[in-house]
Image (cartoon, coloured by chain):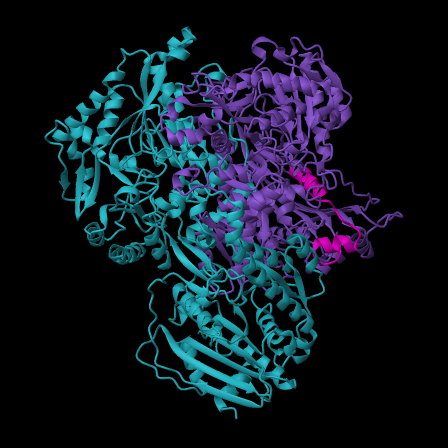
Chain colours: A cyan, B purple
Amino acid sequence: MLPPLLSTLLRRQHGHRHSLRRFLLQLHCQPCRLFSTTTSSPLNFPLSHPTYMIWGSNTSLGKTLVSAGLASSFLLSPPAQCSSGRRKFVYLKPVQTGFPSDSDSHFVFAKLSAIASRCNLPFSFLASNSVLKSSLSAAKSVVSIGGHLEINNLTFGMHDLNFHESNAVLSDGDSVSELVSKTLYAWREAVSPHLAAERENGVVEDSAVVEMLQQCLINDLEVKGENEKMDVFCVVETAGGVASPGPSGTLQCDMYRPFRFPGVLVGDGRLGGISGTISAYESLKLRGYDIVAVVFEDHGLVNEMPLISYLRNRVPVILLPPIPQDMSNDLVEWFGDSEEIFNSLKRIMILAFSERIQRLNDMPKKARDVFWWPFTQHRLVPEETVTVIDSRCGENFAVYKAQNNECMIEQFDACASWWTQGPDATLQIELARDMGYAAGRFGHVMFPENVYEPALKCSELLLEGVGKGWASRTYFSDNGSTAVEIALKMAFRKFSVDSGILLDYAKNNTAETSIELKVLALKGSYHGDTLGAMEAQAPSSYTGFLQQPWYTGRGLFLDPPTVCMCNRIWKLCFPEGMRSGNVICKDMAFSSRDDIFHKSRDKSDLYGIYSSYISQQLSPYSRSNRTIHIGALIIEPVIQGAGGMLMIDPLFQRVLVNECRSRNIPVIFDEVFTGFWRLGAESAAELLGCVPDIACYAKLMTGGMIPLAATLATEEVFDSFIGDSKLKALLHGHSYSAHAIGCTAAAKSIKWFKDPLTNHNVIAEQGLLRELWNVKLVQQISSHPSVQRVVALGTLFALELRAEGNNAGYGSLYARPFLQRLREDGVYMRPLGNVIYLLCGPCASPEICNQLLIKLHTRLDEFSQS
Amino acid sequence: MLPPLLSTLLRRQHGHRHSLRRFLLQLHCQPCRLFSTTTSSPLNFPLSHPTYMIWGSNTSLGKTLVSAGLASSFLLSPPAQCSSGRRKFVYLKPVQTGFPSDSDSHFVFAKLSAIASRCNLPFSFLASNSVLKSSLSAAKSVVSIGGHLEINNLTFGMHDLNFHESNAVLSDGDSVSELVSKTLYAWREAVSPHLAAERENGVVEDSAVVEMLQQCLINDLEVKGENEKMDVFCVVETAGGVASPGPSGTLQCDMYRPFRFPGVLVGDGRLGGISGTISAYESLKLRGYDIVAVVFEDHGLVNEMPLISYLRNRVPVILLPPIPQDMSNDLVEWFGDSEEIFNSLKRIMILAFSERIQRLNDMPKKARDVFWWPFTQHRLVPEETVTVIDSRCGENFAVYKAQNNECMIEQFDACASWWTQGPDATLQIELARDMGYAAGRFGHVMFPENVYEPALKCSELLLEGVGKGWASRTYFSDNGSTAVEIALKMAFRKFSVDSGILLDYAKNNTAETSIELKVLALKGSYHGDTLGAMEAQAPSSYTGFLQQPWYTGRGLFLDPPTVCMCNRIWKLCFPEGMRSGNVICKDMAFSSRDDIFHKSRDKSDLYGIYSSYISQQLSPYSRSNRTIHIGALIIEPVIQGAGGMLMIDPLFQRVLVNECRSRNIPVIFDEVFTGFWRLGAESAAELLGCVPDIACYAKLMTGGMIPLAATLATEEVFDSFIGDSKLKALLHGHSYSAHAIGCTAAAKSIKWFKDPLTNHNVIAEQGLLRELWNVKLVQQISSHPSVQRVVALGTLFALELRAEGNNAGYGSLYARPFLQRLREDGVYMRPLGNVIYLLCGPCASPEICNQLLIKLHTRLDEFSQS
């Protein structure tokens, strides 16, 4: 028998007729609970069964009818079509407004029940509908039509409504079809969710919706019992249009993005509907969604023709018969008319799902067959260790795992994808749109002698940002390595002009053979992989005959003093060469990291020691020697990245700059790694407290989206290329010089990272990021027995594992098992031999960084015990 | 008095009341004319006055009310606000369906007239409305309500309707406000334009709409008379939603794209309207449009809040008061209520326009202040020669000209933006969407040891395309130069393994110092600007001490035989060194270009001559010499690009490959310029008829959007890096290795260029492009007295101007004035000294190429006469 409450409810909703054989009802409203806003941990959800989003290009276009049609096709078709006797259709409606008079999960439940009750099914049919949480106002409405609700003093937050209704149509056979229909959150007013949530004091954070959806997927898609087989199909129906706000105000297409389920777009068959359908499709594509079909009600306007043409047959377009005006009846006739259509749609969706899974499963093998990964010994990467990345959302990868049950797990990109990454999820989608705009507006256009907005804007932002106070020119190229080669050419020309070499050269063309220019650089530095950049670095694993037979090492390479935290203390370590004879040069300690950077150190004795050490090293290259000259200084300011995340004493680098400047040796800062807030300031030059003549930027400059590099220079450097002949100009360029899409991404990212409104880490008055790494935890890790040294600065946290022999150095595999375990924790890291590091984006919250450190610390204990 | 026809018309439309002081009417329907489909010549339209598109996120949201409101604000406000006594508002409706009962241009005309007649204006008000062309069916409808139309036997095409109505409200003062309202094309049925056009046999090509719109802009925005001042404001109102099809089926947002006028988006204030408005906005952004304001009718749902949040205050959101249900009255009250709103909107639009023009005017100076252009002697680029590129649409730039009247002119990008460009307008927008998708889905993710769809897809397409039959591995990098450095490292390792050098090296570490590896390369070749790539090329202007003090030239550089058309004949020219002693080596002629590539030449005497010449050159580097080895051959197959568009005898290159292969010297093809249909086949290797061991690709690979390069290699090359140690792996990589956005663009472009359905130039059975350059014209140009030689192959047409002394060579400015004139013709070219060339995309039509050749030929005559 049907209890009075539900009876009322159903009549209010759809005038449903209660002709089911059995009908069960359960309704209990529990005391309300305040919603918690803690951020979500990395997602982990099943991909074992087809799961789709149902999107609409507008509201009221029939999303729920499509869901119900799919449910009917899946559950009520003859069981022969079905490989096992058990079928389950999961319908999830995360966000429902207008409740209880509107309830899409109830609609699906009721329509399916009605259809099932009319058929003489050769199998049992079970159906349930639940509404998990609602606003107080919605809960009261349920009460007002007969429910029971304990209402506390609390007047806001979401309440555990736990409404449940179910029914069954039983049959003799073993086969069972089951509908599980659920509303996750419901509000009373029939307006946009963000508005209803606000008005009903029931705002829900995105993370809560996402986590509850994840929980439902885990619970409802799991097939219990080892040997149980069941065909499962799941749809998640959105509310309103694709870009309608969810309960927190975040657009739904953004809110659900971490799942990136493929979707069906319910389009608009009316006049004007082509446009809305295409635009909605584009909004979904811009967020990285795949759409497997577009479905819409036929209004006789042949809207399908332009849609098919637009979609170029990549996506099927499916028409639904006209929907009856009166939705209150069982719609049995309409569903009957649509049966074949929904069968087709279902087949398309099942096929697309199995193709996706097949491809994901095949990818590791294919990758091993066709890729040649850089910096990778392929023999050390068996198929099962290849990581399949399905997508990125902000700082997390979604990684596909085929083992046991297919699933997707999120991992924090803690190597920042080779130190390039910066965007949070919001910046990523804004960059996607802005880069799409730049592609639509410019694609790429020729740079020399031309001007276009993104290149100009990017250049202006660079000069008033990282180049402020010294740079006046921007030279664009493609990556750090090319930016360094350009910088070297600039420096050598400037030096040649200043030193008179060029004049000699012009007078006497044989000068070419007799003069040799070298760089002054630091051991352990790394400036890129092209030959010119490599020549500027000291011999290493990268430079031997095995790697680059042409490498000679055209530099004077100094061993620098370094700084690190050991056993909770920041310490200064001097290289052997500097130590001998200097009593002061035994290791020193600092009371804090700030002290290391303090300008007052310029007045210390160490300044003089550094200065005379450098002078001594440079003395063989004084002007009197007419053949070999030091034509440039090149350093990575503060941190040497690829060299092993070594922190160089900033005082030493400052002295180096001063000594070179006094000798007219142009100074190059390689800020490819350190630039754009990597170390907590927009440029590492700011930390160093001195400026270069030339500096190189790349990596984070585009926010971590695409290659683009810039070499900035002073007007004096630029002037050394001015003359009457084209041959005097700097003849170095790459095809995509200053490409519009990269410049657009760079302009956006530079502004975003800098603006306290978009980057909450920026302390405006200081021009610095707040501390991201919990100081206590950093100290704790630095005192761990497995840890040699630690560096924490800006977005970087690095540690060197104690290791000896083959376990140390770049070729070492020592850290591998350690990092493998961290991947299980949802942290994706890559080692530099026995040095491991965490890098986050400039906008990452300290809370997230904290979680990373805690996970690392825990695994460190395991590692030292093993 | 109002003639009966118009009276009827007006009543049918809006029940307009005829209280105007004067009313003029002119209506004459002329005999119909068939529409011509010839493609449009480069656009040239004024930017002298604010001109805006009015877009809607759906149909019937009030676009026309916004237009009318703006017209009213602009024309009927007190003249004090206005700097001159004359004001003109131009309302253009290019596409109107439902005509004559729906006519937005009449609506604006009628409402403005009504408002004007009610005010006691202190200035004269003139208004006119015209409908230029209509379908026969629409024309007949006009006739049926009293018009006159001569109908010929023709039953399709568009008819010169030339409907005109006008009126005036006169006043004593000198001030005049004038409304010019125009419908360009009208159809009778109130359905989507493409459907109406098809049903009424009145399909109109996009080029016709665009050209007529251009003509109206030129006519109506021109201010006649030298000293006349007039404030002009123009709106172009679209039909339906942003992505509603135009009369040819092309989406309107695509059809109007060449103008890229800034726009106002009329959004949707109803339930679900947030989503539709945001999606429409994104569709416009994806096509490179700027939107200066979003306007919508207030339905009390505070839709503005999420919109403002989404737009981050970059774009103002403006609410209109609720629109009366009955639109048939004069709406004077509604316009009155909206007065301040439209005044604000008008001010926003005028300000945004003047800011845009200001920025465009400032750009040349700013560019000269902050840029450092590659390959550019800044002293030779005065401010007035800087090209301001506002946008690209397919193969055309839109270039802003400030001189005289501000205007935008289109130029064909005939240098293909440093040889990178390929997309037509359709591919550009598809790439924009796909790249947006990749950015939304992946941004960039880590490559080594990982796999993700775009990198895998791109790799598969490369291996089954340009790598077919030989390559099995893809090594990604950023540009041609890095791809070449990687190729050299691969080749040297392979050679070292095969020759036993590596074994020696492993035994005896001092081998490092004694062994020297060189490349075999051709003079005139160019492989990139980074040092490693430069070392592989012969000395040139790019390699001297002035440019790169570290260059030494680590190669054996051969002077190759070349082929070109001189005086209508394809000729083979031998270098000096080969000529001496060989009687056969005097210049030879070919009867056709195909003969040059014919494989039968392998049986000619020349094969033996080439072979022994090469053997002789290689003999000093035979195995017996234990210190210097030739470790790689590197060539640009068929055409040397930067070296001056030289065509090398393919037989010579084939012999070179064979000779190297027989000596176990790995063969590298640098296909950075020649790859992806540049020379008419997907790879130049196909033309050459032999395969490399390693090949480099970049430029056109991404369709000309962003940097990405690939070095393909055989499995044998790959195997020489396999071992147990990471140090044996190829340790070369760039941060954005295999970046997802670039791989997505590449995958799309590779497929697009190859598929006869998307690239009409592809002859599927031959795997070749059809001939793009008219053979007769090419011959004609080759016999021109100013022309030294010509090469026409695939998408390339090049010629060398006869020049001597300083006029010849890379540094020459000889061709400059010539190319300056071609820019006036809408052809943007860049010289390589005295060599000039035309490059088009692989999809460019032979008709367009023909136009380019004709323009070039005409200017050649002028040039030789000057």
| A141 with respect to A66 (left or right) | left
* Residue A484 visible in the picture: no
Question: Quick one: B798 or B768, which is closer to the camera?
Answer: B768
Q: Residue furthest top?
A: A507
Residue A451: in magenta span: no
The quarter of the picture where residue A644 lies is: top left
Per the picture, the main secondary structure of the magenta-coloured stretch is helix
Q: Residue furthest right?
A: B153
Question: Quick one: B805 or B830, which is closer to the camera?
Answer: B805
Question: Quick one: B214 or A470, which is closer to the camera?
Answer: A470
How far from the left and from the top, in percent, is residue B817? Answer: 60, 18
The residue at 19%/28% (across/down) is A577
In the image, is residue B252 above or below residue B493? below
Task: Please provide the residue range marked out in magenta.
Answer: B188-217
Q: Residue furthest left?
A: A583
How far from the left and from the top, in percent, is residue A66? Answer: 60, 70
How far from the left and from the top, in percent, is residue A822? Answer: 34, 56
Q: Residue furthest bottom?
A: A1
* Residue B537 visible in the picture: yes
The quarter of the picture where residue A352 lies is: bottom right
Question: Quick one: B647 or A127, which is closer to the camera?
Answer: B647
Task: Please count the marks in the image.
Answer: 0
Residue B190: in magenta span: yes
How far from the left and from the top, in percent, is residue B643? Answer: 57, 21
| A80 with respect to A703 (left or right) | right
Q: Quadrant of the C terminus of chain A?
A: bottom left
| B142 with respect to B60 (left or right) | right
